[in-house]
């Protein structure tokens, strides 16, 4: 097959980034059986000869519905989670009653301090994942990787950053539950294949992960992690397309679900966003001309990069010494951006999907004050995610906003609880009521969401024990009735309290004097013409990309189901329950 060189992709300036590749070799559309090589994440110079039937869908490298708006080695270091293995007591801090964003990604090209800037940008994205962090840089055609468990500031220090020279880098922060399989799944992943090395950092979730993995394993692929991201590296390695950019296109054409990814090679940085645009990904420039990609604009702000635009749904952007080129995976359907980025995940100072997160949350609170008013003396928030909505509620209702709950930012995973058990110990460690604000008052407390309801009930009890006369709960999102399959770690639908109980039943369960959610119709009305461009699956159960088997989630309980095992955190000590074989393989024959 004749190679297609990157020179065929015309460079374009940042003012005109939409030059599209419109032709491709006809042989791409053919189905054939040929040997291929599978990447080995442990030894980049080790390969396996296998066979594989190429994806039959031809590439469509045009996009006509954008919105206007010789191989090298790599070295790697990983750092274990000592404070987890040496802990005396681990307690439930009710973290499972909040949704968890799986991760945040960063990519930097063309800056001599790429690793340090990447480190800072990851720090700005720390809210998107607190369990693991990693950075990959390129120096003298060698990809250098350092990953570890913990916060960005715990994984990296001056010495480690000095080990990451180079003017391009990608980085990743990750959320997951604790466990022995945690470290191997910390990204970015780096793999060697016959034409070089490639690193990838991924935000999202592939709903056809089990199908793709079963197919690859059936053809002899060996996986080193339990992450769906590793599938992408295997698909890149087996692709027959040229140049490297088209290998990524080939791989992404086979993916279903949510992915915002950054790739790094010896000489290129590539950013990709899935055709639905589920997860955010933005592009910026520094004053020295360096390109920056990040999950949120708050990361650009910290490293003094100017926001330019979003990476469009279905878009692939490649940056190298020739400049920037862009193309589309396929003519994509209507965008379905995750609405929870505006409700909970993103920082208030970020601009996500073209909208200010702060403005959205404040307007959510104003709607609650208008549509669910109640006589009250003070408005408080469940910090930190409920603060902006509470400010909007208070302003609209003409009631003072006060700090009735103080959050501790120094709560770790492990505490020694007194032998005489303290009720609601986990919540009390994180949230302290202010009696001077609450005592004898009718209190409206604003939170972003209710998941299982266990934390909300403890907060209501905490406020009443502090002297609140009445507690009225206001939730700045509609009731959540369905799980997310696009990169958010949510409970199963059966565990979601709004899927089982009415609003009045939930009110009784949590013990508040009244309860109101943000009306779904009002949310859509607020978004106006943009409303159809958001995903509301968690509120409606209608999935833009239906999972093949809703009973199996790739990231149902952190890494555990990733490993083909099913169990709760307690199962670490009590043993595992094996997932049925036909379920694990996604019924692939």
Image (tube, helix red, strand yellow):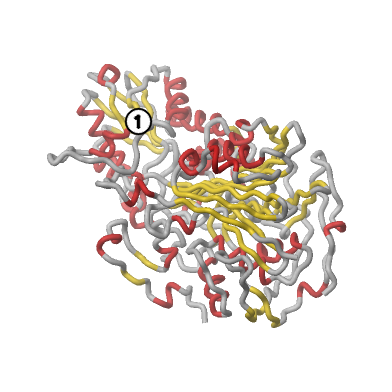
Query: Relative to 29, is 44 on the left or the right?
Result: left
Query: Relative to 330, is 452 on the left or the right?
Result: left
Q: Secondary structure at mark 1?
A: loop
Query: 124 or 82, which is in the foreground?
Result: 82
Q: Is residue 128 above or below residue 1?
A: above
Q: Is residue 154 above or below residue 247?
A: above
State the residue position of label 1.
408
**Residue neighbourhood size for the residue with mark 1, other residues' Cα within 10 Å, grouped as few (<14), some (14–19), many (≥20):** few
Q: Is residue 87 above or below residue 257?
A: above
Query: 409 or 27, which is in the foreground?
Result: 409
Q: How many marks?
A: 1
Q: Position of residue 538 (x, y in %)?
A: 46, 51
Q: Is residue 537 visible?
A: yes
Query: 131 or 434, which is in the foreground?
Result: 131
Query: In what quadrant of the picture does the N terminus appear?
Result: bottom right
Query: 6 or 102, which is in the foreground?
Result: 6
Q: Position of residue 407 (x, y in %)?
A: 35, 29
Query: Relative to 216, is 85 on the left or the right?
Result: left
Q: Position of residue 399 (x, y in %)?
A: 39, 18
At a point 86% along the width and 52% down the height, the residue shown is 10
At a point 68% along the width and 41% down the height, the residue shown is 292
At a point 51% along the width and 66% down the height, the residue shown is 224
At a point 50% along the width and 28% down the height, the residue shown is 362
Q: Position of residue 565 (x, y in %)?
A: 38, 67
Q: Is residue 532 visible?
A: no
Q: Is residue 157 above or below residue 406?
A: below
């Amino acid at each position: 097959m004749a190679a297609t060189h990157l020179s065929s992709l015309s460079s374009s300036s940042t003012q005109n980034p939409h030059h599209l590749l419109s032709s491709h070799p006809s042989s791409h559309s053919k189905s054939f059986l040929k040997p291929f090589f599978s990447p080995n994440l442990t030894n980049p110079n080790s390969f396996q000869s296998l066979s594989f039937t190429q994806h039959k869908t031809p590439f469509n490298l045009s996009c006509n519905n954008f919105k206007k708006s010789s191989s090298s080695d790599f070295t790697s270091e990983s750092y274990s989670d000592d404070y987890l293995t040496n802990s005396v007591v681990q307690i439930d801090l009710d973290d499972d009653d909040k949704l968890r964003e799986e991760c945040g990604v960063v990519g930097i090209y063309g800056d001599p301090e790429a690793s340090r800037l990447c480190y800072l940008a990851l720090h700005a994205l720390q809210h998107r994942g607190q369990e693991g962090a990693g950075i990959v840089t390129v120096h003298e055609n060698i990809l250098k990787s350092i990953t570890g468990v913990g916060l960005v500031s715990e994984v990296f220090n001056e010495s480690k950053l000095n080990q990451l020279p180079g003017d391009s880098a990608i980085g990743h922060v990750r959320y997951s539950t604790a466990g022995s399989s945690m470290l191997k799944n910390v990204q970015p992943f780096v793999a060697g294949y016959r034409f070089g090395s490639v690193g990838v950092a991924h935000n999202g979730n592939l709903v056809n992960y089990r199908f793709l993995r079963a197919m690859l394993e059936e053809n002899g692929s060996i996986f080193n992690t339990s992450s769906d991201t590793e599938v992408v590296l295997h698909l890149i390695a087996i692709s027959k397309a040229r140049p490297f950019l088209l290998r990524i296109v080939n791989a992404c054409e086979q993916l279903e679900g949510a992915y915002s990814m950054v790739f790094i090679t010896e000489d290129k940085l590539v950013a990709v966003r899935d055709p639905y645009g589920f997860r955010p990904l933005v592009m910026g420039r520094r004053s020295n001309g360096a390109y920056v990609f990040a999950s949120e604009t708050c990361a650009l702000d910290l490293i003094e990069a100017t926001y330019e635009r979003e990476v469009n749904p279905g878009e692939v952007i490649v940056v190298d010494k020739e400049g920037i080129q862009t193309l589309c995976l396929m003519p994509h359907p209507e965008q379905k951006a995750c609405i929870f980025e505006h409700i909970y995940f993103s920082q208030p100072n970020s601009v996500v999907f073209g909208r200010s997160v702060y403005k959205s949350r404040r307007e959510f609170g104003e709607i609650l004050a208008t549509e669910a008013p109640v006589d009250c003396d003070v408005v408080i928030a469940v910090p930190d995610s409920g603060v902006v909505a509470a400010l909007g509620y208070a302003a609209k209702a003409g009631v003072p906003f006060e700090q009735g709950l103080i959050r501790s930012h120094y709560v770790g995973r492990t505490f020694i609880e007194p032998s005489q058990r303290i009720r609601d110990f986990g919540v009390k460690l994180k949230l302290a009521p202010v009696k001077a604000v609450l005592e004898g008052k009718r209190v409206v407390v604003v939170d972003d969401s209710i998941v299982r309801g266990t934390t909300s009930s403890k907060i209501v009890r905490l406020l009443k024990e502090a002297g609140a006369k009445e507690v009225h709960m206001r939730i700045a999102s509609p009731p959540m009735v369905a799980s997310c399959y696009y990169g958010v770690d949510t409970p199963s639908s059966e565990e979601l309290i709004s899927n089982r109980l009415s609003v009045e039943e939930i009110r009784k369960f949590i013990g508040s004097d009244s309860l109101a959610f943000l009306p779904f119709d009002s949310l859509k009305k607020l978004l106006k013409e943009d409303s159809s461009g958001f995903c509301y699956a968690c509120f409606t159960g209608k999935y833009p990309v239906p999972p093949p088997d809703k009973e199996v989630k790739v990231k149902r309980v952190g890494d555990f189901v990733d490993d083909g095992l099913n169990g709760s955190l307690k199962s670490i000590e009590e043993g595992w329950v094996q997932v049925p074989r036909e379920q694990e393989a996604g019924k692939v024959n």
